[in-house]
Amino acid sequence: MKLTRESLPELSHLQFAVLEVLGTAQMRGKDLRTGLSELGIKKSGPAFYQMMARLEEAKFVAGCYNQEIIDGQIIKERQYRVTGDGICALNQTKKFYHGRTREMAPQPAFA
């Protein structure tokens, strides 16, 4: 097995999952949390929004508020989309691990 001195990806496994679930769509925080929960990732509301704030700060996602009036109540929902930097980080992370899994795959034995 040949290991190269390539730097580790910028994204943690949680950040990778967020960007992967977001894909190319713009998504409400609520729907994003549902997508993550389907992957077995469950975060409390505050922990989720803190993580999203860090992703925004790193310029991997962009967020905005969408305001709706439901039954006379003004509701503000946070929506997110992946930025160009986020797509680059996601692709670099995929490439990093894809290369590692290929290097670690068992080689066939020759008789």
Image (spheres, helix red, strand yellow):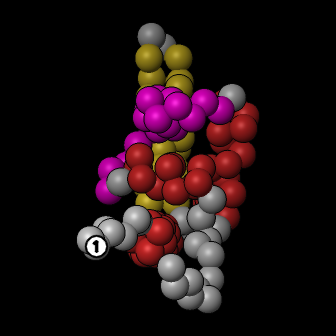
Q: Height in image: 29 above or below 99?
A: above
Read off the magenta span. Answer: 24-43
Q: Nearest the camera: 7 or 83?
A: 7
Local packing at callout 1 (Cα closer than 10 Å; few below 14, some 14-19, many 20+) is few
Q: Height in image: 107 above or below 35?
A: below
Q: Height in image: 71 above or below 4?
A: above
Q: Position of residue 54 (x, y in %)?
A: 69, 57
Q: Residue at x 47, y 68 (%)?
A: 104
Q: Nearest the camera: 4 or 70?
A: 4
- Work out whether residue 98 can be spotted: no
In which quadrant is the C terminus drawn?
bottom left
Taking the view exactly as shown, the residue that stands out farthest to the left is: 111
Q: Residue at x 51, y 85 (%)?
A: 2
Which quarter of the figure has residue 84? bottom left
Q: Nearest the camera: 99 or 32?
A: 99
- Work out whether residue 50 can be spotted: yes
Could you say whether the residue bearing mark 1 is in a helix, strand or loop?
loop
Which quarter of the figure has residue 57? bottom right
Q: Position of residue 71 (x, y in %)?
A: 45, 10
Taking the view exactly as shown, the residue that stands out farthest to the top is: 71
User: Is residue 14 rendered magenta in the image?
Assistant: no
Residue type (three-letter) at the residue carrying disc 1:
Phe
Q: Residue at x 41, y 65 (%)?
A: 105
The residue tagged 1 is 110
Q: Position of residue 8 (x, y in %)?
A: 62, 76
Q: Residue at x 61, y 89 (%)?
A: 5
